[in-house]
Amino acid sequence: MTYKFYMPPISLMGENCLQDLPNELSSRGFTKCLIVTDKVLVNIGLVDKLTKLLTSHQINYVIYDETKPNPTVTNVNHGLTMLKENHCDFVISFGGGSPHDCAKGIALLATNGGNIGDYEGVNKSQKPQLPLITINTTAGTASEMTIFSIITDEERHIKMALVDKHMTPIVAVNDPVLMVAMPKSLTAATGMDALTHSIEAYVSTIATPITDACAIKAIELISCYLKRAVDDGGDMVARENMAYAEYLAGMAFNNASLGYVHAMAHQLGGFYDLPHGVCNAILLPHVQTFNAKEAGPRLKCIAKFMGVDVSEMSDEEGAKACIRRIKELSASVGIPVGLSTLGVKKEDFTTLATNALKDACAATNPVVGTLEDIIKIFENAY
C-alpha cells in the first residue's frame, strides 16, 4: 500500500509570526484577497490585526464575515459571489475551523466550478483551489493545514465531509498571540477536538510511524497544557504549546484520517447545529470503549502518553485507564458529560447513525461497526 503525506508547503509558527506573512505574499504577485472570517472576530477587533498589516504592505482586500460556526453551502456560495464580483485572485481565512472550511469551499469552487456538494467525498476535484492562506485563531481544528473541509448542507441537515488534496493551503499561520482572545469554553472545546484528532489518528487503520510520531507528541502536549490554557488564557507558554499540539494533531489525522468520533460528531453538528469540539469530547471515550476490543494495545499507549503509569497493566486495563484519563481531562476543562445536555433527541439516533456510517471519516475506524453498534454508542453517550 502506498501512503501519502499532505501539509502546507509553508507554515509560520510562534509568537507574533503573523508579522512575517507579508514577506510570504510579496513574491507571489497577488493583487487582491477575499478575507473569510466571522462577525465575532470582526467585532472584537481581531481581524484588524490582519487588515492593518495588509494595508501597510499595499495589499488590497474585501471581507466576507458571514461564516457560521458550522459553515453552510449558502456561506460558500455567498463568499464565492463576493470573490468573483471583486476580482480577488487569492483567499485568506482568518479564524478557527469554520472560516478555514468555508474558505476552502470558496477557493475550490473558484477554480473547479459546480456546487460544493459535487466534491463531497475523497479527491473529487480536478484542479488546485485558488491560492489560500490560513490564519488560525484557535488551537483545535487544524483546518488551517489539512485537506479536510466540513460544510453543512442546510437542505439535508447533514455535514458533508470533503477530503481533497487540492484544498491544501499554501501558507498556514499559527500565531499564539491571536489565540489569547479565545474564551475558556472555546479553548476547552477546541483543545478536546485536537485530542480527538490525535487519538483517532493513532488508532486509525492507516496510521504510519510518521503519523504516530505526530499524534504522540500532540497527546503529550495537550495533556500538559490544555487545562493551563483554559485556566489562564494569557499563559503564553500554554497557548504556544497548544498551537503546536493542534498542528501536530492535524499532521496526524490529515494523513491517517479519523474514525467514528468524527463521523458521528459531524451528524450532530449538521442536524442540531452543535459545537463540533464539544460533540467530539463527549463521544470520544464512548467510541474508544467500542474500539478497545481491537485497539486495546494502542489505547494503553495513549494512556502512557497522557501520564498514566501503565507498566503493570494489561492491554485491557491500559485501555480502560486511557478512557478514564480522557474523561478526567474533559471534566477538568468543563465539557458537558452527555449529549442530553445539548438537546439531542433519542428518536433521531437511527438517522444520525445511518449518516455516520456514510461519512468519509468512518472508513478508518479500527473496528467496523453495524448500524446497531453506532446507535448503541449514541445511547451510551447520552
Image (spheres, helix red, strand yellow):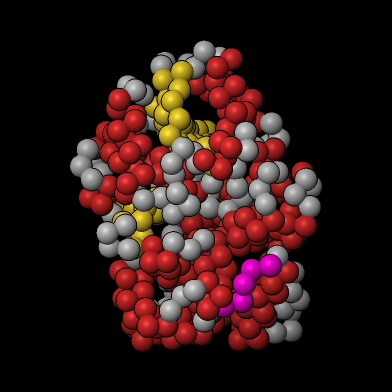
Q: Return the x and y of residue 10 as percentages of the image width and height.
A: 52, 33
Residue 262 magenta-drawn? no
Q: Return the x and y of residue 296 as percentages of the image width and height.
A: 56, 80
Residue 336 magenta-drawn? yes
Residue closest to the eye, 35 or 163? 35
Residue 88 in sight in this render:
yes
Image quadrant in which the N terminus is located: bottom left
Q: Residue at 43%, 79% (x, y): give it.
A: 345
Residue 263 in sight in this render:
no
- Magenta segment, which residues? 334-338
Is 38 left or right of 191, judged from the image as shown? left
Q: Residue at 52%, 13% (x, y): give it.
A: 58
User: Residue pushed farthest front?
Assistant: 43
Q: Residue at 51%, 61% (x, y): give it.
A: 275
- Relative vertical location of residue 247 with respect to residue 106 in this rendering, above or below: below
Question: What is the quadrant of residue 67 in the picture?
Answer: top left
Question: What is the quadrant of residue 185 in the picture?
Answer: bottom right
- Relative vertical location of residue 278 with respect to residue 214 in this rendering, above or below: below
